[in-house]
Amino acid sequence: VSINEEAACQDYLVSYLEADSTLSGLVNGVWLRSRPQSAPMPAIKIDRQDADDNMVIGLHRVWADLTFLVRGIVHWRGSGQPDWAEVRAIGDRIDTLLHDHEQMTSELEVHSFREESFTDETIEGGDVFLHVGGIYRVRAREV
Amino acid sequence: MPAQRVKLESRFPAVKKAMWEAVQEARDDALDIGEEETQNRIGKARSSRGYDLDPFVVNQEKTGFQSGRIFVPEERWYYKFFEYGTVYIQATPFMRPAHRKMRKAFVDKLGDKAPKFIRRKAGVRVR
């Protein structure tokens, strides 16, 4: 039975990040793709960026080559210059967990590294949000 | 024994020119493929999520003799929110997948097809 590595990998990322006690102390949840407006902040959001399969002769899939944008988001409620300290701490922890990371689960063998840093400041519905994270390349193969 | 004349003709300039053109052709193909991929992806986001996006927002540009890029014009800066997603919007990337396709197309074209292309352009016959 073959599995969809991308879907399995998404699940893995969510549960791996949720299981970290340091990160749990910094955020109020890990969200995959969509995040309800009522969900408390700060939060981690995972967005899929791209996927590709690495195949060899016989259509044997060596691994799925996936990229995910993983970022911490903080709702800035202060005035004046936004303070990035809180969101930076989240971004740093994400990087500690996901950069140069390898793991074997019951269904996947995974390794990940940061390919590109990501920071942004968005104004949504009149609120200011600070984002820090990175685009992580995750290679996953079923075991 | 009668003297024989041998005429040597160098095809090196023609090969060099053909190689140059091979890279340009690979670049042009890659740019077309990349632009088309962004149109497909943005079109899909329009139909599946109802975003009012312009599928033809991405342009291509040849930079220098052999380089090029696809890009969203600066005045449409807000397309980055769809590429990366925001707090409430989920990402619908179109540039990154297009870039992957372009890279593959460029390498494919130069890897397997370049020697044939160069031989044909430069008029080189292999015996």
Image (spheres, coloured by chain):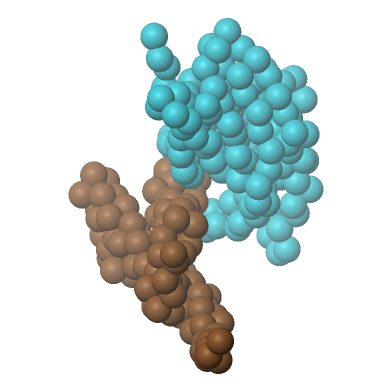
Chain colours: A cyan, B brown
Residue B83: tell me if it is visible: no
Q: Could you tell me which residue is drawn at 65 percent across and 15 percent down?
A: A104
Q: Quadrant of residue A33?
A: top left
Q: Residue at x 73, y 36 (%)?
A: A99
Left or right side of A28 for B33: left
The residue drawn where x is 44% and y is 29% is A57
Spot occupied by residue A87 in the image (x, y as percentages of width and height)? 71, 45
Residue reaching furthest left? B47
Residue A136 sits above or below residue B12 on the image: above
Q: Quadrant of the C terminus of chain B?
A: bottom left
Quadrant position of the N terminus of chain B in the picture: bottom right
Q: In the image, is A127 to the left or to the right of B119?
A: right
Residue A81 percent coordinates (x, y): 73, 63
> Could you tell me which residue is drawn at 27 percent across and 46 percent down?
B49
Q: In the shown orientation, is residue B7 left or right of residue A115?
A: left
Examine the rendered structure and indicate whether residue B77 appears above or below residue A21: below
In the rendered image, the vertical position of residue A2 relative to residue A41, given as above or below: above
How many marks do you count on the picture? 0
Judge by depth and name the residue closer to the eye, A96 or A131: A96
Q: Position of residue B116 (x, y in %)?
A: 40, 65
Q: Is residue B98 visible?
A: yes
In this rendering, the answer to whether B116 lies above or below A99 is: below
Percent coordinates x, y for residue B99 in the rendering: 47, 57
Which residue occupies the foreground of this view, B80 or B14?
Answer: B14
